[in-house]
Amino acid sequence: MNISNFFYEQFISGWSKAESYTWVDTAAYAILAILLISLIYKILKEKVKFDIKLLLNILPFIILGSIIRVYADTGFYERFFWTVTPGIWILMVILFFTSFFLDKLFKKKIFLNYLPSILILLHLPFFKIINYSAIPLYILFFSISIIPIFLLRKKYSIFKNNLSIAAIMSHLFDATSTFVNIDFFGYIEVHIIGSFFTELFNTGIVMYILKLVVLLPLLYYLDKDSDKKFSNYLKIMICVLGLGPGIRNFITILLGV
């Protein structure tokens, strides 16, 4: 197999069909994510405060990207680079920065506050829910998963920081989406590491443990870092990495894709 065929099989072919991730594309997308995260920080570090408010500004872009991504699976949008991973998320980064700098230009928060929300609303007439039963399951298991956070909040410092709590809750929501979709609706995990453990234990509930085993030490380390601005930025990025697949999974199950 020559280089062009290898590149096509590992990347391009996946843009036109349902994903089945390999170690190669997983590693490549991880490197791309690291580069993007580094670039975004360099652009924003002197321009914004990395806090919950910024995360809330980013959230509509995550929801919009997730909707477009799922709509590509339904056939509403054609599947190509800009409607699937990683293209859709690169597109959302571009849209975010376009909105951000337009707001700076006009000295008003118009685009950042309203543009993604308007684009989301334009998609809602085509949002046909099939699996209403998934909603109470998500609420139940997500609620159960976050109860320990609030019970332990006064005892451990890691649960006192709002961005740390947001990061944990984001990934517990992602774990909930994996658990509910796999165990109650027969979906499968397509990511390499996740699929290995869900198949090994024959349940998606293992994702709760995996998330916490990785996340809690990481957040503890970030809390000890002297560069609080960079630590808070990384916590926001951790939130994004949890919310992206979690919201996409939730929309996927609602639409019965």
Image (cartoon, rainbow, N blue to C red):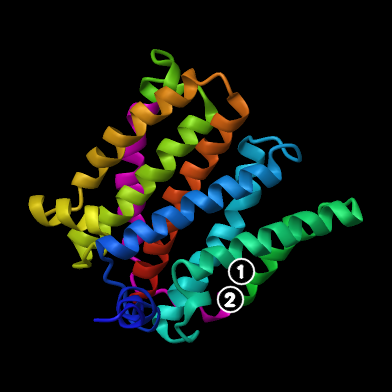
Say which of 4 and 213 sits in front: 4
* Residue 40 against residue 8 in the figure, above or below: above
| Residue 5: quadrant of the picture | bottom left
Q: Tell me where residue 209 appears, x and y as whole percent.
A: 23, 38
Q: Residue at x 38, y 84 (%)?
A: 16
Dominant SS in magenta: helix
**In the displayed structure image, the side of residue 140 where residue 223 appears, left or right:** right
Assess disc 2: are there few (<14), some (14-19) or many (≥20) residues with their C-alpha within 10 Å of its C-alpha.
Answer: few
Residue highlighted by disc 2: 123
Q: Is residue 198 left or right of residue 22?
A: left
Q: CA distance from mark 2 to mark 1?
A: 5 Å
User: Badge 1 is on which residue?
Assistant: 120
CB-based contact (under 8 Å), mark 2 and mark 1: yes
Label 1: few (<14), some or many (≥20) within 10 Å?
some
The part of the chain drawn in magenta is: 124-149
Amino acid beneath label 1: Ile
Q: Nearer the viewer, residue 117 or 100?
A: 100
The percent position of residue 228, horizontal first and vertical second, equals 59, 24
